Image (cartoon, rainbow, N blue to C red):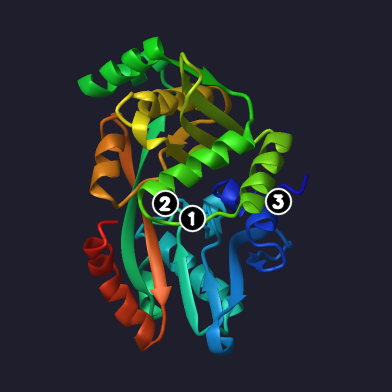
Amino acid sequence: MNEIACTNSLFEQPWWLDIVAPGEWTAAEVRDSSGKIIARMPYVRRKGRFGKNRIIMPEDTQNLGPWFNENIRAYVQGNKQFVKQKEMIDELLYQMEPFTECELTLNCANTYVLPWYWNGFKLTPTFSYRIDVSQSLDGIFAKFSKSTRKNIRRAQQESTVSCETDIDAFYYILDKTYEAQNRNNPDSRALITKMIETCDKLGHGKMFTARDHSGNLQCSAYLVYDEKIAYALISGSIPAFRGSGSKSLLYWEEIQHAAKVSRVFDFEGSMIEGIENVMRQFGAHWVTNYHISKSGIMRDIFTVMKPRIKKLIGY
């Protein structure tokens, strides 16, 4: 297994990037005088229309870099650590050039993002919710809203949760989820299969599937994790069972498993009001992942219009 230590999350591991962007990714690195990596920025370069050289976020990847050695993040009197971080960002960006468009979502460990702005990037905050799973599970459950606890208890009585990997059932549920939104599933079956099989093999993933007592599929979710962070990566629900509480039950199952293998559970976030409301009721705290972008005028126009288009189509 090709694993390295200089990462913020499993999304920055070579094996993960080989799944979601085979042959398209590389990493900018800064080393100290002894040759030790002190800053690292993995990224995916993909050719766009008319030969445009684009840096993009790969599929099913919440955030990417940059990773800094802890000494670079550590406070220095007068906030001098930011001087060093700016130097690192400038050097990483220099290595990433040239490109005509760039869109990245930075890991939430990166709160000092002004150097990206000074380099001409637009900054957009996105949000996720997290739970510290090193605390007691009883304490975590007690922080859930009253309605969330009620939904979980009801679902525990009416549903059965399996942790068996069933890619056929999982992909069927995803298809039905997008079908209810009049959308096509953006993930190919080949990608989902490779992702799940690899994570299962490496001990970095687990599937949870809920069925009613008649055996009908209700919802399914896939959790990916390392020793630092567990992410609720992908999930879906059969529309007829969305009021069953089984989705809340699966979140609770994921949180309990995360407590065994990691330190933090991340809901992966959403900017959609209804979805954010569900996550918020689990009593988690939010974190900010900055989305950075640099592009030409046509891309800027599309970015401005995108929220309006989504509102018009009810997305």
Report x, y in % for residue 115.
Answer: 40, 72
Q: Amino acid at mark 3?
A: Trp
Please indicate whether residue 212 sits to the left or right of residue 239 in the image: right
The residue lying toward the viewer, choosing from 243 and 223, is 243
Please indicate whether residue 210 sits to the left or right of residue 95 in the image: left
The reply to whether the C-beta atoms of the residues labelled 2 and 1 are less than 8 Å apart is yes
Looking at the rendered structure, which numbered label has been put on residue 155?
A: none
Q: Nearer the viewer, mark 2 or mark 1?
A: 1
Please indicate whether residue 181 sits to the left or right of residue 98 in the image: left
Query: Which residue is denoted by mark 2 in the rendering?
Result: 108
Depicted 68 relative to depicted 266: above or below: below
The C terminus lies in quadrant? bottom left
Q: Earlier in the sequence, mark 3 or mark 1?
A: 3
Q: Amino acid at mark 1?
A: Asn
Q: Residue furthest top?
A: 157
Q: Earlier in the sequence, mark 2 or mark 1?
A: 1
The residue lying toward the viewer, choosing from 49 and 260, is 49
The residue lying toward the viewer, choosing from 114 and 248, is 248
Query: Which residue is denoted by mark 3 in the rendering?
Result: 15
Q: Earlier in the sequence, mark 2 or mark 3?
A: 3
Q: Secondary structure at mark 2?
A: loop
Report x, y in % for residue 85.
Answer: 47, 64
Residue 106 quadrant? bottom left
Q: Residue at x 32, y 74 (%)?
A: 303
Looking at the rendered structure, which numbered label has been put on residue 63?
A: 1
The N terminus lies in quadrant? top right
Q: Amino acid at mark 2?
A: Cys
Depicted 255 relative to depicted 97: above or below: above
State how far apart marks 2 and 3 are (Cα). 21 Å
Q: Residue at x 72, y 37 (%)?
A: 202
